[in-house]
Amino acid sequence: MNRVEKSMANLKAMAAKLGAPKLEGKEAVGGKHAPALYFGSTKINNNFELVDAVSKEDGKGMTATFFVKSGDEHIRVSTNVPKPDGSGRAIGTVLDPAGKAIIEIKQGKPFYGEVTILGTPYITGYEPMKDTKGNVIGIYYVGYRK
């Protein structure tokens, strides 16, 4: 779990260096229209620099994702979690609405533990992403394949 917590701290610190998170406009992500996530003036949708940097720094098998809240869904707008068929990044896919992580996130709490992501078990961390007004606008995720 220490590895996941360290990676979460790294992901959040890298994002914070760019500025506060905000949603502005919409953009197609993996064939799905999603709110556009920014940290400061840097758009995160379809931008894999931060998720890849965390994975590179934190070692083999580490994955990272930025989710945005869109109605009742949380959409992966930047990720290096692979699609189940191995055909690329799982952008545009949605966080399991009945999963253990979302139950905690909806209460404004982080979740750390084992979760199955797109059919593969991972040791994970999920933390709510809040805008400057304190509204939950997305989710930070890190994890590694079990």
Image: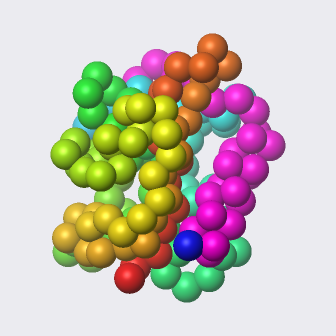
Q: Judge whether residue 59 can be spotted in this image.
A: yes
Question: Along the line of sight, which residue is nearer the eye, 59 or 103?
Answer: 103
Q: Position of residue 113 (x, y in %)?
A: 42, 65
Residue at the location (40% across, 79% down)?
Answer: 145
Above-or-below relation of 22 to 18: above
Residue 9: say if magenta: yes
Of residues 106 and 117, which is closer to you in this image? 106
Q: Give, as a single range, the part of the protein colored magenta.
A: 2-30
Note whether residue 138 is visible. Answer: no
Image quadrant occupied by the C terminus:
bottom left
- Quadrant of res 102: top left
| Rendered position, 57 above or below 29 | below
Q: Residue furthest right?
A: 17
Residue occupying image coordinates x 56% and y 73%: 1
The correct choice, above or below, for 71 with respect to 17 in the image is above
Q: Position of residue 25 (x, y in %)?
A: 46, 19
Q: What number of labels is visible?
A: 0
From the viewer's perspective, is 50 left or right of 14? left
Is 80 placed left or right of 33 in the picture?
right
Which scheme is used to colour this image of the protein? Answer: rainbow
Residue 39 locus on image (x, y percent): 66, 34
- Confirm whether the magenta stretch covers residue 36: no
Q: Residue at x 63, y 14 (%)?
A: 133
What x and y, as percent, mark residue 74? 33, 38
